[in-house]
């Protein structure tokens, strides 16, 4: 391997430490404890693990953690009533509804019911619009974490060619917006893109958010490029379940200048950025000075 490893685990630990300092200051100076509410509908095992991790890390940085676990057959009206109550609760500064929701619930309607000021996932249509027009918004956690890592590695991103593979509302599109905001020349690729490997080889920064295990091999990578692997895929290897990214790490790391591993890359940054967004939301809601080191 010749590429530099971009260690998201260590970076996320630094962000959590910064968050803890800000939480301590907000408590001491303003008598406020930032609070994050997570709403989980149903029994999806992966979602349960995510929610448990979020709750633990929220408590570790000194914030209040509120968990609302609802049965899989919860009606839309009941879920919206929970969100309304959280919107009205002054102890709650951030609200996250764990996705995916069961099929009978309309995710867009549910997400758009969250008070945009408490929308720490940055998925509310108001925040999407603010980000798209370059205004101050809540920035989706995974792309925020990716941008922080890229800025940390490159410094200034202006003028770099960035290719984002994936155009989801959660990762691909906001990632592209953030890179554009940092003056990259941005290409968004997707399942209908022709000559994908050739498109990717133009990238100084290649972000893979595809959801296909190890699809992006070394042939897709320009020598010296920075590769950010957002993918989380569970695959069976040698009789054991393992996590792999959307990037074929071994071959890509031979060509790239820098690369994020899976696990230990983007994944830990996502929860750290959720905590950071909760501090940002607390400060904005209460007219407190906003920490510049927790957002972009
Ligand atoms: P989606 O399934 O919503 O989107 C996948 C995107 O990849 C789509 O835009 C799709 O194109 C594109 N795509 C699919 N197949 C191909 C292909 N063969 N060639 C080119 N493009 C393709 O996934 P998400 O954006 O939600 O997630 C992407 C990955 O990131 C997943 O592995 C997910 O688990 C992971 N993830 C990780 C997070 C973290 O914290 N690290 C957080 C969120 C997601 P089209 O639109 O044309 O269908």
Image: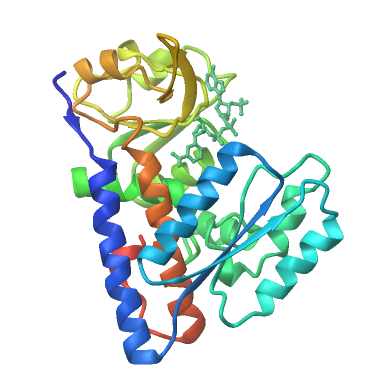
Q: Is residue 266 above or below residue 233?
A: below
Q: Position of residue 198 (x, y in %)?
A: 39, 14
Residue drawn at 32 percent across, 10 percent down: 219
Q: In the displayed image of the protein, which residue is found farthest to the left?
A: 2
Q: Position of residue 247 (x, y in %)?
A: 38, 21
Foreground residue among 18 and 168 = 18
Picture quarter with the C terminus: bottom left
Q: In the displayed image of the protein, which residue is found farthest to the front?
A: 239
Foreground residue among 74 and 110 = 74
Q: Is residue 136 above or below residue 43?
A: below
Residue 259, quarter of picture = top left
Picture quarter with the N terminus: top left
Q: Quadrant of ligand 1?
A: top right
In this view of the protein, can residue 131 be seen by the observer?
yes
Q: Position of residue 101 (x, y in %)?
A: 71, 45
In this view of the protein, can residue 157 be seen by the observer?
no
Q: Position of residue 235 (x, y in %)?
A: 48, 18
Q: In the displayed image of the protein, which residue is found farthest to the bottom?
A: 30
Residue drawn at 30 percent across, 82 percent down: 25
Q: Is residue 128 above or below residue 7?
A: below
Tell how many labels.
0
Q: How is the image coloured?
A: rainbow
Residue drawn at 42 percent across, 52 percent down: 271
């Amino acid at each position: 391997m010749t590429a530099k490893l971009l260690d998201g685990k260590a970076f996320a630990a630094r962000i959590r430490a910064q968050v803890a300092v800000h939480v301590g200051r907000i408590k001491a100076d303003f008598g406020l404890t930032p609070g994050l509410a997570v709403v989980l509908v149903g029994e999806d095992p992966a979602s349960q693990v995510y929610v448990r991790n979020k709750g633990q890390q929220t408590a570790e940085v000194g914030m209040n953690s509120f968990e609302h676990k609802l049965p899989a057959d919860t009606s839309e009206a009941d879920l919206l009533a929970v969100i309304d109550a959280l919107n009205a609760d002054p102890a709650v500064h951030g609200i996250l509804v764990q996705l995916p929701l069961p099929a009978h619930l309309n995710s867009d309607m549910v997400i758009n019911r969250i008070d945009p000021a408490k929308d720490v996932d940055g998925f509310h249509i108001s925040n999407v619009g603010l980000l798209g027009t370059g205004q101050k918004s809540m920035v989706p956690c995974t792309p925020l974490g990716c941008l922080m890592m890229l800025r940390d590695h490159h410094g200034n991103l202006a003028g770099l060619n960035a290719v984002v593979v994936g155009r989801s509302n959660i990762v691909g599109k906001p990632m592209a917006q953030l890179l554009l905001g940092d003056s990259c020349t941005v290409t968004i690729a997707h399942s209908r893109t022709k000559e994908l490997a050739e498109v990717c080889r133009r990238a100084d920064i290649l972000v893979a958010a595809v959801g296909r295990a190890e699809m992006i091999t070394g042939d897709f990578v320009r020598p010296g490029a920075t590769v950010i692997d957002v993918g989380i895929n569970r695959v069976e290897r040698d009789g054991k379940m393992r996590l792999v990214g959307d990037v074929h790490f071994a071959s890509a790391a031979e060509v790239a200048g820098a690369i994020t591993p899976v696990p230990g890359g983007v994944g830990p940054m996502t929860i750290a950025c959720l905590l950071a967004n909760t501090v940002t939301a607390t400060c904005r809601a209460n007219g407190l000075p906003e920490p510049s080191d927790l957002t972009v």
